[in-house]
Image (cartoon, grey):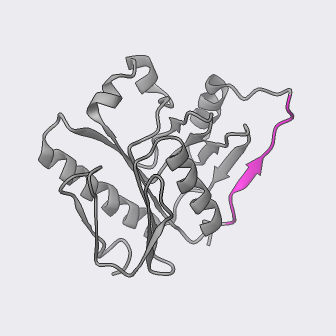
């Protein structure tokens, strides 16, 4: 099991600009680095093999659904994409999706770095080093910043928590599949290989 993520706190007079954060991430590609709304860095270790395999399946299944819609519907991102949320946090969901019109409303320059946008859909896949409490906080943060649907998939305890605006999370015990609802219309995620084998 990987050690817990490390949080680096900065003095109030130290500004961690978007440009500096980009340079820190580029200089340390082996680490997953996120910035909190308060300006601190959270450094996560790379995913282990099993977590990476599960996340690859999750992202691939969203990509296959999206490609089946045609190129005009939306854009899928894997865990290496970072987004600057309206609250100033920079987050990297394990899998995310943004409608194409929202994505194309950003400038080409904005799309090259930590895009200033919250995805419409986010999924977090819990790995052994993840705190469920912190993942739940991130899911609430995504919703507060504009996400319309979120899934917290936990292979450790066999649950999926579904997050929607204006409602408390819905917890499902070992579901075989979950529905993308009106955010990912027609998408049904088969959870074999992701939540359980």
Q: Write down the region rendered in magenta.
A: 3-12
Q: Considering depth in this image, is 72 or 56 the residue closer to the camera?
A: 72
The residue located at (69%, 66%) in the rendering is: 3
Q: Considering depth in this image, is 29 or 185 the residue closer to the camera?
A: 185
The residue located at (45%, 54%) in the rendering is: 94
Residue 131 visible, this angle: no
Q: Is residue 108 above or below residue 49?
A: above
Location of residue 33 in the rendering, given as x and y in whole percent from the top left corner: 61, 45
Location of residue 75 in the rendering, given as x and y in whole percent from the top left corner: 29, 39
Q: Is residue 30 above or below residue 22?
A: below
Location of residue 11 in the rendering, given as x and y in whole percent from the top left corner: 86, 35
Residue 85 visible, this angle: yes
The residue located at (36%, 80%) in the rendering is: 196
Of all residues, the one furthest to the front in this rendering is 166
Q: Is residue 24 shown left or right of residue 58? A: right
The residue located at (62%, 28%) in the rendering is: 23
Number of marks in picture: 0
Secondary structure mostly seen in magenta is: loop
Location of residue 40 in the rendering, given as x and y in whole percent from the top left corner: 74, 41
- On whether residue 6 falls in the magenta region, the answer is yes
In which quadrant is the N terminus drawn? bottom right
- On whether residue 14 falls in the magenta region, the answer is no
In which quadrant is the C terminus drawn? bottom left
């Amino acid at each position: 099991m990987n050690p817990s993520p490390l949080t680096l706190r900065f003095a109030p007079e130290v500004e961690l600009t978007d440009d500096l954060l980009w340079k820190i991430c580029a200089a340390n590609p082996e680490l997953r680095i996120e910035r909190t709304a308060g300006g601190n860095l959270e450094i996560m270790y790379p995913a282990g093999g099993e977590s990476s395999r599960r996340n690859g399946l999750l992202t691939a299944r969203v990509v296959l659904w999206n490609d089946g819609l045609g190129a005009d519907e939306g854009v899928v991102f894997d865990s290496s994409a970072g987004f600057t949320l309206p609250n100033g946090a920079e987050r990297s969901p394990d899998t995310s999706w943004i409608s194409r019109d929202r994505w194309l409303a950003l400038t080409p320059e904005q799309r090259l770095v930590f895009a200033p946008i919250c995805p419409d859909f986010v999924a977090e896949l819990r790995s052994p080093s993840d705190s469920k409490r912190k993942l739940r906080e991130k899911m609430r943060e995504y919703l507060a910043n504009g996400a319309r649907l979120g899934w917290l998939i936990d292979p450790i305890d066999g649950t999926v928590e579904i997050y929607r605006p204006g409602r408390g999370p819905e917890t499902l015990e070992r579901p075989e599949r979950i529905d993308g609802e009106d955010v990912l219309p027609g998408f049904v995620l088969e959870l074999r290989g992701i939540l359980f084998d």
